[in-house]
Image (cartoon, rainbow, N blue to C red):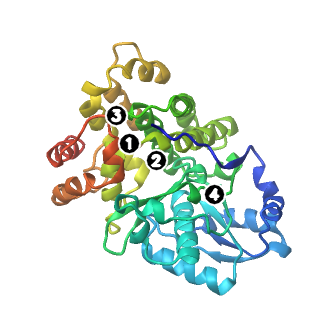
Amino acid sequence: MPTISYLTTIRFDHGALDTIAEACAGLKIRRPLIVTDRGVVAAGLLQHLTDRLGNSLAGAVFDETPPNPTEAAAKACVAQLEASRADGIIAFGGGSAMDLAKTAGLLHRQGGAVGDYVAVAGGAGRITADLLPLIAIPTTAGTGSEVGRGAVIVLDDGRKLALLSPHLIPKLALVDPDLMLDLPAPLTAGTGMDAISHCIETFIAPSSNPPAEAIAMDGLWRAVRALPRAVADGHDRAARWDMSMAAMEGAMAFQKGLGAIHALSHPLGAYAELGLHHGTLNAVLMPAVLRFNEPLIRDRLPRLRQVVGLAADADLAAWARSFTETLGLPTSLADMGVPRDILDEVAAAAILDHTHATNPRSATVADYRAILEASYH
């Protein structure tokens, strides 16, 4: 029996950032720690936030979030939470900053190591509501972590695993598409493909959750039309609005489950030395995963084709590769610089990822290895 819940509060529109001081007051946050990354700082976006917080809410900043958040970075963030005596957290950035903020907030209040709380080890039941209030402000349109119940972290032992709990959902998501107007085209494309992968994998996941499916299809409809426009012209405010909504909807919906795309992209993203972008990995893996799942999702394909604007007999996997290519993204793992000698290890790790269980077609290690091979060129 599915559990259906959409529990967070969302402020969404151009200019939503202007309400941040009011939002802090509503959550009784007087000394926030801002969790972000150096890219956000270098782009001048952090200044927009601090200007609106004003001197009365000026707090500490943790800007050491890595591209794929790590347990080590979470520990460093906990140390800054304690040193600054923060009474709340503002996650400001992409999915990495938001996931790191969730994890650091958890360790700060509930102790232990990240491995104590990972979903595949039954950690969800150990996560309680004893957390600092968290406001999440995305600066990319991809993960939707601002409304998500999860955080994906690279553990000290090298595994990239998820924490999942409704207690990790931010108290407030503040989504302002204007923050994304100057996002570079490659990052716009890669994060946008992350949102598209969420919507597609949610829709084909085998559990029953019609509200999630409806939300996912609205998100997919918006994204396939808005993403090329946002890549071509970052200052297309309507396209940025639709992409922000699509990313948020993808994450609202994927409580229904994800699948083999993410089961593979998570362990690939754990190779810190490769610096692989999560959303771009999802785009590269999508065609082969769709072909693998096709025998079990024939009833879903007509709706997917309709939403993305294809003919009734069109090849959805071929469309996914072509769409990725038109955005200027790589279309193979080789193009992304993935060494072939790690593929066996990735396939073995994929079967242990929490999203493996909700793929519509049961996959073996050999199946995952074949999907990786099909995605290599």
Residue 154 image offset from top left, x and y in percent: 39, 67
| Residue at the extreme top of the image, as rendered | 312
Q: Quadrant of residue 361?
A: top left
Q: Residue 170 carries which label?
A: 4
Q: Residue 162 carries which label?
A: none
Q: What element carries label 4?
A: loop
Mark whose residue sits in front, 1 or 4 = 4
Q: How crowded is mark 1: few (under 14 residues within 10 Å), some or many (20 or more)?
A: many
Picture residue at 56% right of the left edge, 31% below the top: 211
Residue flagged by tag 3: what amino acid is it? Arg
Q: What element carries label 1?
A: helix
Q: How far apart are marks 2 and 4 (CA)?
A: 24 Å
In the rendered image, the vertical position of residue 58 relative to residue 210, given as above or below:
below
Picture residue at 63% right of the left edge, 36% below the top: 242
Direction from residue 243 to residue 9 in the image, left or right: right
Q: Do the residues labelled 2 and 3 touch (CB within 8 Å)?
A: no
| Residue at the extreme front of the image, as rendered | 1
Specify which label sits upstream in the sequence, 2 or 4. Answer: 4
Q: Which mark is residue 190?
A: 2
Q: Do the residues labelled 2 and 1 touch (CB within 8 Å)?
A: yes
Q: Do the residues labelled 4 and 3 touch (CB within 8 Å)?
A: no
Split into 4 quadrants, where in the image is the C terminus?
top left
Q: How far apart are marks 1 and 4 (CA)?
A: 27 Å
Q: Which mark is residue 321?
A: 3
Split into 4 quadrants, where in the image is the N terminus?
top left
Q: Distance between the residues labelled 4 and 3?
A: 34 Å
Residue flagged by tag 4: what amino acid is it? Pro
Q: Is mark 2 on a helix, strand or loop?
A: helix
Q: In which quarter of the image is residue 310?
A: top left
